[in-house]
Amino acid sequence: MTKSELIERITGIIGKPKVLELSRILKAQQFALHDLIDTTFHPDKAVAFRAVWILENVFLTAPESYLPDLEYMISRIKEVKHPGCMRHYAKIIMHITDAKAPESLQLKLQEINFEPVVEQLFDWMINPRTKVAVKIFAAYALFNLKDSFPWVKEELTAQMEFLMRNGSAAIQAGGKKILKSL
């Protein structure tokens, strides 16, 4: 499947079953993750959202298979603008930085400059227009990165305390869990 065929297929997708089906097809065809990442930046928000949803499904089922594309994906994080795309990228970052992530993935991440990612995650948390799910996924990802960036612990604590002042139930629950773990 070419990149243009992918965009055409994505345009017709409605609902989770179709996303999962196309994810399986792309994985079976060994579709270039690089092209799927590029599609998550499509000007049509619906196409971009579905592409990043597929990216999450494809990437998180076997992240070790996509180590060569990991740095490229990470390098594009500052370009993510669509709220729906932010959610999936933050979720991907949360999972790949988790202590339970495969060792090969953890080793690859050590080779990548994660400073821009940390900055982006904090930007998403600070922005009042950012959706709650993005803030929570960003907070958990930052929690996972606290040992690699010692200053993150203090900043994350301050940000979570600020968000919890008037935050939603999800912010309250996530914030309590993160603060307790910090």
Image: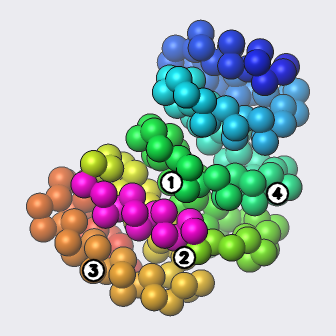
Which residue matches tag 4?
A: 67
Residue located at (69% from left, 52% from top): 73
Relative vertical location of residue 124 with respect to residue 143 in this rendering, above or below: above
Q: Residue 43 vs residue 180: left or right?
A: right
**How far apart are the alpha carbons under marks 4 and 3?**
33 Å
Location of residue 17 by image quarter: top right
Q: Say if the magenta span includes residue 4.
A: no
**How far apart are the alpha carbons under marks 3 and 2?**
16 Å
Which residue matches tag 1?
A: 90
> In the image, which residues are magenta?
116-128
Residue located at (32% from left, 46% from top): 131
Q: Earlier in the sequence, mark 4 or mark 2?
A: 4
| Furthest residue toward top | 12
Q: Main secondary structure of the magenta part?
A: helix
Circles 2 and 1, Cβ within 8 Å, touching? The answer is: no
**How far apart are the alpha carbons under marks 3 and 1?**
20 Å
Relative vertical location of residue 137 with respect to residue 57 in this rendering, above or below: below
Considering the image in quadrants, where does the N terminus appear?
top right
Residue located at (25% from left, 59% from top): 171
Amino acid type assigned to the residue bearing label 1 in the image: Ala
Q: Earlier in the sequence, mark 1 or mark 4?
A: 4
Which residue matches tag 3?
A: 158
Position in image of residue 72 (x %, y %): 75, 54
Dot 2: element: loop
Q: Earlier in the sequence, mark 2 or mark 1?
A: 1
Dot 3: element: helix
Q: Earlier in the sequence, mark 3 or mark 1?
A: 1
Amino acid type assigned to the residue bearing label 3 in the image: Ala
Which residue matches tag 2?
A: 145
Amino acid type assigned to the residue bearing label 4 in the image: Leu
Amino acid type assigned to the residue bearing label 2 in the image: Leu
